[in-house]
């Protein structure tokens, strides 16, 4: 039996609940995640950890310096987290995120239309990769002749994303 084809698939209602990131400086990370992206601090554990959320969830992201205070990002060519993907509810909400990043002078490392979603790519202050994205409606997802999802990577209409964020 192949390890890629489970004999007993996971319950399809399982989701990724939160991510916990090792950071070098809590305040710098809070400035980015709360000050730029708009998350809210739910709880702080002294000067070493903070838990942040969108809305009234217990936390979507945990930030801590327990093993990383003053640390550096992992060197290229090492294993670890590639990126955390933050799912926005609408295209306009993703456009708002783009405007927040632009106002803060934070550069994107990429932007793509994947057919099923539109995505912005960047790094947080500690070099952790982030994907900010929204899912397109399922009825427009590209499909192969056999009906399988057929994602791709094409240039994102960034100007269109900005227009929809501005209400246009």
Image: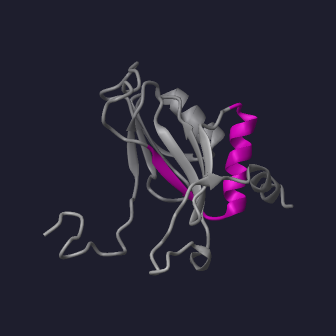
Highlighted magenta segment, given as a residue range:
83-105
> Is-magenta flag for residue 155?
no
User: What x and y, as percent, mark residue 117?
Assistant: 58, 62
Depth check: give the residue in front, 73 or 100.
Answer: 73
Identified at 57% across, 39% down, the residue is 122
Indicate the quadrant where residue 136 lies.
bottom right
- How is colour applied across the structure in the image? one colour
> Is-magenta flag for residue 97?
yes
Depth check: give the residue in front, 133 or 2.
Answer: 2
Identified at 37% across, 74% down, the residue is 13
Q: Quadrant where the N terminus lies?
A: bottom left
Identified at 54% across, 27% down, the residue is 28
Indicate the quadrant where residue 11 lies.
bottom left
Q: Is residue 24 above or below residue 151?
A: above
Depth check: give the residue in front, 43 or 101.
Answer: 101
Identified at 33% across, 38% down, the residue is 80
Indicate the quadrant where residue 17 lies.
bottom left
Q: Residue furthest top?
A: 70
User: What x and y, as percent, mark residue 159?
Assistant: 79, 50
Q: Residue furthest left?
A: 1
User: What x and y, as percent, mark residue 33?
Assistant: 56, 40
Q: Is residue 81 left or right of residue 92?
A: left
Q: Is residue 22 above or below residue 41?
A: above
Q: Quadrant where the C terminus lies?
A: bottom right
Q: Residue furthest right?
A: 168
Q: Is residue 110 above or below residue 156?
A: above
User: What x and y, as percent, mark residue 158?
Assistant: 74, 50
């Amino acid at each position: 039996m192949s390890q890629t084809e489970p004999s007993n698939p996971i319950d399809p209602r399982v989701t990724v609940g939160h991510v916990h990131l090792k950071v070098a400086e809590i305040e710098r990370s809070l400035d980015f995640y709360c000050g730029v992206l708009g998350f809210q601090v739910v709880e702080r554990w002294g000067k070493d950890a903070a838990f942040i959320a969108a809305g009234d969830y217990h936390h979507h992201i945990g930030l801590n310096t327990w093993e990383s205070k003053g640390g550096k990002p992992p060197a290229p060519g090492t294993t670890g987290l590639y990126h955390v993907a933050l799912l926005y509810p609408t295209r306009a909400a993703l456009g708002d995120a783009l405007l927040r990043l632009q106002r803060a002078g934070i550069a994107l490392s990429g932007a793509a239309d994947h057919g099923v979603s539109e995505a912005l790519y960047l790094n947080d202050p500690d070099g952790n990769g982030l994907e900010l994205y929204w899912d397109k409606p399922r009825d427009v997802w590209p499909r192969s002749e056999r009906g399988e999802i057929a994602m791709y990577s094409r240039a994102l209409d960034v100007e269109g994303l900005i227009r929809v964020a501005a209400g246009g």
